[in-house]
Amino acid sequence: MFYPSQPIPGVIIIWGMSHAPTTVPGHQFASDNTAGVCPEAWAALEQANAGYAPGYGEDAWTARAADLIRELFETDCEVFFTFNGTAANSLALSCLCQSYHSVICSAVAHVETDECGGPEFFSNGIKLLCAEHEQGRMQPNQITRLVEQRSDIHYPKPRVVSLTQPTELGTAYGLEQLGVLCDTAKSHGLSVHVDGARFANAVAALGAAPAEATWRRGVDVLCLGSTKLGAPVGDAVVFFDRDLAREFDYRCKQSGQLASKMRYLAAPWVGIFEDGAWLKHATHANACAKRLAEGMKACGLTLKLPVEVNGVFVDMPDELAAALRARGWHFYGFIGGAQRFMCSWATTDDEIDALLADVRTAGC
């Protein structure tokens, strides 16, 4: 029986009851996590799979992955690996807070809209205070407003500002914006957490060094995503302030995030970061989004939001959206009524052209 050892461009593998793979056309723009494992991550996994290795993160692959992240950010940060972003964000915020604290975030932040109460659960009760936003980006005056609106003992005391970079609406905080937000947070004695599921896409868009987009601006903790870059699974929690990471390893263990065969979480990071594949894949996905956006505009459609990373948010008539879905295209109706199309490391020009051809046929 044949099992593909590399992703097949434009094809999704579906496993049925017989355990034999079948394929369907890859009409996937619903998320950048629908793509397969990128070649660099796959090759690293194959190497990690050779022979025996110590468990629970005591292996060479985990050490190398952590060192590569330190090299990337140009600082001696503390690094922990988790199975997914929900765990990374929830555990990071629970580490920064006591149960009577609150976290200030945008009303469309991922920790507010898509974590199923994970931060509240793992922290034993912190409260998320939702700030107004402009195209997904929190404004500094909102931090001050939420800190100063009450200071009595009946109010959950603000302790952290959580930013999503890039935002859920496909916009990115500029370096100056990020610095002002961090300075505002620090002026109120707050730590700064960044949800970076697509952090690489933001870095590619900004053209900045990762250090400049994080700790040098005042970020204390980054939850760094890998699956959008082509890894099969896993996030990294990066503490730029090592003091904040005290006993975080115990939190990971208690919450089921300490992998016995940690090398399989760590190895893809080595493959993606060792030769710069992370930036190549992020740059490619961003470029695909811009190409798709231009094609949508050429069809007379209006973009709901600027295209700054790898997502395209389109103001699309319901009839056209339904017609595209009937043709097998997958995409999400999203916050604010837009139709969201996400590009990935594996997106091809042919896939974009095929989608645009159906847009023209169905309603352009």
Image (cartoon, rainbow, N blue to C red):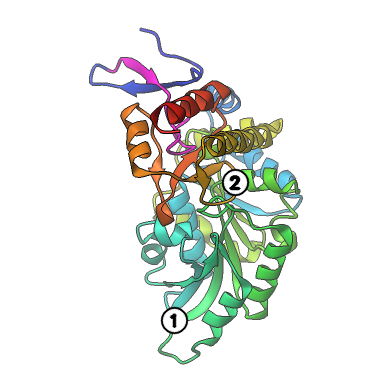
Query: How many numbered markers are drawn?
Result: 2
Label 1: how many Cα within 10 Å (few below 14, some 14–19, many 20+): many
Vertical position of residue 322 compared to residue 160: above or below: above
Task: Using the rendered image of the protein, determine whether residue 60 is visible from the camera's viewpoint.
Answer: no
State the image coordinates of residue 259 (x, y, percent, origin top left). Answer: 45, 42
Residue that appears at 47% across and 75% down: 102
Mark 1 against mark 2, which lies toward the viewer?
Answer: 2
Q: Which mark is residue 307?
A: 2
The mark nearer the N terminus, 1 or 2, is 1
Q: Amino acid at mark 1?
A: Pro
Q: Which mark is residue 156?
A: 1
**Which residue extends farthest left?**
17
Element at label 2: loop
Task: Using the rendered image of the protein, determine whether residue 183 is visible from the camera's viewpoint.
Answer: yes
Residue that appears at 57% across and 31% down: 345
* Main secondary structure along the magenta-highlighted residues: loop
Considering depth in this image, is 269 or 61 the residue closer to the camera?
Answer: 269
How far apart marks 1 and 2 lie (CA) works out to 36 Å
Left of 188 or right of it: where is 57?
Answer: left
Q: Quadrant of the N terminus?
A: top left
State the image coordinates of residue 249 (x, y, percent, origin top left). Answer: 51, 55
State the image coordinates of residue 148 (x, y, percent, origin top left). Answer: 55, 86
Residue that appears at 41% across and 67% down: 123
Is 23 colored magenta in this rendering?
A: yes
Q: Quadrant of the C terminus?
A: top left
**Span highlighted in magenta in the image:** 19-35
**Which residue extends farthest bottom?**
152
Considering depth in this image, is 197 or 263 the residue closer to the camera?
Answer: 197
Q: Amino acid at mark 2?
A: Val
Element at label 1: loop
